[in-house]
Image (tube, rainbow, N blue to C red):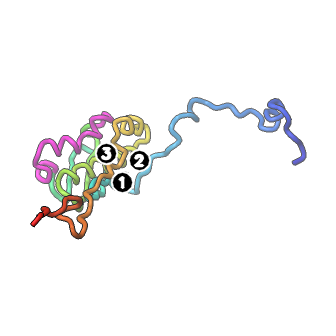
């Protein structure tokens, strides 16, 4: 340490001109894509785990090798899966390929939604604000509580008999 800094002016003299431009204040993240131009993310909800790949396309969604309207027959589940695209304003711009395991259909739809949101954010970091504000990047960690021994279910006990 050849020079001791005692004031703000002394700090400026040592640091030089360090001005922050608006471009530098924007999101510093860079897009994450593989050699095929896809982004990959894992989504989870309840006991369901979804592996999701997105790439630019016509909006085709394939889950476990089946089209979305075949795998998720209920319109509510299809709507849940398409929410990230609606919020980010990218409907029919990305093709989705997902594999999902565990849980039921509702949990699987939530897991795919979580995975799509994370993959969208990786593909285009500028979408992160809208997805985060909508709460799609947060993992819903609620899981069914395990059954305990000596109990009928997780907390319910067997019927008490006085005699």
Distance, label 1 to label 3, CA atoms, is 15 Å
* Residue 148 image point, x, y percent: 25, 66
Q: Residue 79: within the magenta?
A: yes
> Can you name the residue that lies furthest to the front here?
163
Helix, strand or loop at disc 2? helix
Classify mark 1: residues with Cα within 10 Å, few (<14), some (14-19) or many (20+). Answer: many
Residue 35, quarter of the rendered image: bottom left
- Residue 94, placed above or below residue 49: above
Residue 95's label in the rendered image is: none
* Residue 129 image point, x, y percent: 41, 36
Q: Nearer the viewer, residue 80 or 62?
A: 80
* Residue 16 image point, x, y percent: 77, 35
Residues marked 2 and 3 touching at CB (< 8 Å): no
Q: Residue at x 18, y 56 (%)?
A: 104
* Mark positioned earlier in the residue sequence (1 or 3): 1
Image depth: mark 1 or mark 3 in front: 1
Quadrant in which the C terminus appears = bottom left
* Residue 2 image point, x, y percent: 90, 46
Q: Nearer the viewer, residue 66 or 146?
A: 146
Q: Residue at x 33, y 42 (%)?
A: 136
Q: What secondary structure prevails in the magenta region?
A: helix
Residue 122's label in the rendered image is: 2
Residue 41's label in the rendered image is: 1
Q: Residue 47: within the magenta?
A: no
Distance, label 1 to label 2, CA atoms, is 8 Å
Q: How many marks?
A: 3
* Mark positioned earlier in the residue sequence (1 or 2): 1
Residues marked 1 and 2 touching at CB (< 8 Å): yes
Q: Which residues are magenta?
A: 68-90
Helix, strand or loop at disc 3? strand
Residue 56's label in the rendered image is: 3
Left or right, residue 50 beside residue 20:
left
């Amino acid at each position: 340490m050849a020079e001791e800094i005692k004031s703000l002016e002394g700090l400026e003299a040592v640091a030089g001109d360090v001005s922050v431009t608006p471009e530098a204040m924007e999101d510093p993240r860079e897009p994450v894509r593989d050699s095929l131009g896809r982004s990959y993310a894992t989504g989870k909800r309840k006991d369901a785990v979804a592996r999701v790949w997105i790439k630019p396309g016509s909006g085709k969604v394939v889950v476990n090798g089946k089209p979305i309207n075949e795998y998720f027959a209920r319109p509510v589940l299809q709507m849940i899966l398409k929410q990230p695209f609606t919020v980010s304003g990218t409907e029919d711009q990305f093709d989705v390929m997902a594999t999902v395991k565990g849980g039921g259909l509702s949990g699987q739809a939530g897991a795919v939604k979580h995975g799509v949101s994370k993959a969208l954010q990786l593909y285009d970091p500028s979408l992160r604000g809208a997805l985060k504000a909508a709460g799609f990047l947060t993992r819903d960690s609620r899981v069914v509580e395990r059954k305990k021994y000596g109990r009928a279910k997780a907390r319910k006990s067997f019927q008490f008999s006085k005699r």
